[in-house]
């Protein structure tokens, strides 16, 4: 049975500001141009040109049209875009499923990490909200979750 989850979204007060992602395991998927960061209670996806084109505008854009988000154990739909677990790193999608299964609020924002080139931003989803001194909350998502 599907349930609804609120995903709080944040944008930095000033362009270029971000908090550090923190300790993580990095996983690179060359076939899909995806670079995952798996940390305690959060998962990140480096904003490569491919990810920016596919997801950034829909997930953190400031428009009034929020995409429909549906999450199952095997797929994640963001608007018209589809991530199938069989096509991507299973540990990353597994951590996403674990985060969504938990009843804690979820938070989506951009972060950075010193290991990556200057200006690299990471699309971060986690249980902890970002620092309020850096970020302000924008309109949240309502995600439809079915993990049967």
Image: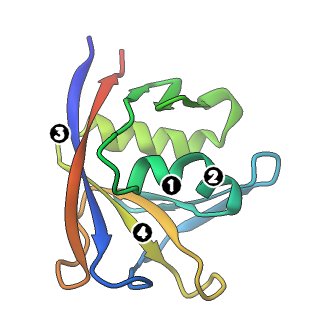
Dot 3 alpha-carbon crowd within 10 angstroms: few under 14, some 14 to 19, many 20 or more: few
Q: CA distance from mark 4 to mark 2?
A: 15 Å
Location of residue 57 in the rendering, given as x and y in whole percent from the top left corner: 48, 53
SS under mark 1:
helix
Point out the image quarter for the C terminus.
top left
Q: CA distance from mark 1 to mark 3?
A: 25 Å
Location of residue 34 in the rendering, given as x and y in whole percent from the top left corner: 68, 54
> Mark 2 and mark 1 in contact (Cβ < 8 Å)?
yes
Dot 1 alpha-carbon crowd within 10 angstroms: few under 14, some 14 to 19, many 20 or more: some
Instruction: Identify residue for label 4.
Output: 110
Location of residue 14 in the rendering, given as x and y in whole percent from the top left corner: 33, 85
Residue 9 occupies quadrant: bottom left
Instruction: Identify residue for label 1.
Output: 56
Which callout, 1 or 3, points at the residue further toward the start of the chain? 1
Which callout, 4 or 3, points at the residue further toward the start of the chain? 3
Q: Specify the label residue 53 is tagged with.
A: 2
């Amino acid at each position: 049975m599907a349930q609804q989850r609120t995903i709080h979204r944040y944008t930095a007060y000033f362009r270029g500001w971000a908090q550090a992602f923190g300790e993580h395991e990095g996983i690179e998927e060359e076939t899909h141009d995806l670079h995952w960061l798996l940390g305690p209670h959060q998962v990140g996806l480096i904003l490569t040109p491919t990810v920016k084109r596919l997801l950034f505008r829909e997930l953190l854009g400031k428009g009034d049209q929020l995409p429909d988000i549906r999450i199952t154990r095997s797929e994640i739909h963001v608007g018209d875009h589809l991530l199938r677990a069989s096509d991507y790193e299973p540990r990353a999608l597994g951590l996403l499923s674990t985060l969504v299964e938990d009843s804690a609020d979820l938070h989506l924002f951009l972060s950075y990490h010193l290991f990556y080139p200057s200006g690299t931003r990471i699309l971060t989803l986690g249980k902890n909200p970002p620092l309020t001194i850096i970020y302000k909350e924008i309109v949240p998502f309502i995600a439809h979750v079915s993990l049967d």
